[in-house]
Amino acid sequence: MTTLTRRTLLQRTAASAGALIVPSFTTAADGQTIQHMTIKPATQVLFEDAASPLWTYEGRTPGPVVRATKGERVRVRFTNHLDEPTSVHWHGIRIENRMDGVSGLTQDPIQPGESFTYDFLAPDAGTYWYHAHNRSWNQVARGLYGPLIIDEPDLPFPKDRDITLILDDWRLNHEGVLDEESIGSLHDWSHAGRLGNWLTVNGESLPTHTLQQGKPHRLRLINASNARTLQIDPTLFKAKVLAYDGQALPEPSAVPGSPLLIAPAQRVDLLVVPQEGFSVEEVSGDEGFAFLRFDLQGDTGDPVPVPAISQNSILEPDLENATLHSLAMEGGAMGGRVAIRHKGQILEREEIMATGQFWVMNGDAGLTDTPFFRAKRGETVILEVINSTAFDHAMHTHGHHFRILAPNGASIDETEIWRDTFLIGPRQTIRIAFVATNPGKWLFHCHMLEHAAAGMNTWFEVIG
Ligand code: C2O
Ligand code: CU
């Protein structure tokens, strides 16, 4: 493993800030716009002047912003110039099932040389992202992700005060280059996943962004890390929370605790009204890592009111008439002995190592032929997740946002948060509730991508 530390890297790196790359469009016969993306290898500097071999959308990571207004249609045509099949998942947005981008469940993967057009209506405004969903532990680790931003029709924040910051935790080798050798390490698969040693913001090291003094800004943070739960303390720059996982709160609210945990795949939109420049530190490692800096321009003129963000309408769960499904999560390192059933067979020790299946959900590692549960459209589902492992997990429901219930399951958490990914700690039990509104086959998996690859992956079906 690398001996590179964040601090030694830090001292040698210069700051710069560039924009996300410019999307390319064509117009279809029906007058609709299609965005085009080529999926291809490219080199990119993540650290100092060391070029890393990455996999990209359009030659750079993160890929171009996909942006539309709520209610509009999004069309993106991807052409795969990799040597392996891929597919693209639109994380957190409630779109129709056949556009969900899950290889092997909702579509056949896009083979090398082939193209596929994703075409969906954006039902909700908010901060989402897209990423590869075939061998994600490999493809996302190499850079295959980008932001998906759906604007509220009334555009609460002007574009120059609405800033997308997609964060990634890279594992670099001692030369400061993406450590490719350790991608797929079974140690990572059976422990905490692929943790890195270098953070980038929009693919850049230690960028400086410029904000306008005294004006309200929306900072959209997206955690694209394979496995690291990012920890930052927004109270240090007097930020409030505008939205979690794309869903706006009724009004800006206090940061629930410090540090704020942003699990893999989670998003948080922050409200910042800066009076002075500041940097943002990530504190999950041995030492704090200041990875992002804000300078100010202009001077505080008349105060600008904080815009209100309109909420999406999501059906409230009907807890009185809900169906409960329990999911026991077991296995992994330090998890004790558990039987691991994979594709219907209990694995022997050598088979566990050969398949890399270390984790089970209700006894099964990986997708089974029949779903974990079926729900009728309109039915409220309570999912009880029991984490008997020694690790944290970041559990993600495809196609649905949910409420996290209070521990006794009796009432909805008054924080009024909708999420699509929740963090669960070792030996913790959490219940979530949602109305099964979206017909089709949906994954429920750990978004620590090594855990998903190593068994923490199941699915449910909404019928009707
Ligand atoms: Cu970000 Cu299965 O997804
Ligand atoms: Cu996990």
Image (cartoon, rainbow, N blue to C red):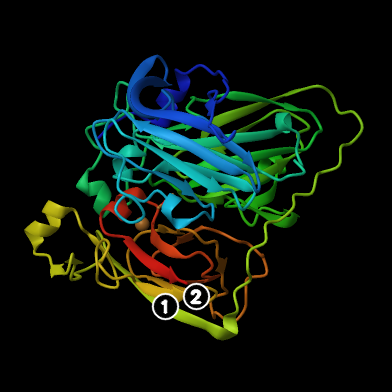
Q: Residue at x 59, y 40 (%)?
A: 149
Considering the numbered disc 2 on the image, is that residue within a helix, a strand or a loop? strand
Q: Which residue, as the protein is rendered here, is positioned at the far right?
A: 302
Residue at horizontal 46 percent and vertical 73 percent from the top = 383
Which residue is found at the position 70% from the left and 28% from the top?
277
Q: Position of residue 74 (x, y in %)?
A: 55, 41
Which quarter is ligand 2 in?
bottom left
Q: Quadrant of residue 49?
A: top left
- Looking at the rendered structure, which numbered label has been put on residue 325? 1
Determine if residue 285 is in view: no
Give the vertical position of 188 relative to 40 (above or below).
below
Identify residue for label 2: 381
Contact between labelled residues 2 and 1, with CB atoms less than 8 Å apart:
yes
Residue 31 in view, yes or no? yes
Horizontal side, residue 334 vs residue 426: left or right: left
Q: Nearer the viewer, residue 264 or 91?
A: 91
Question: Looking at the image, is 400 positioned above or below residue 232?
Answer: below
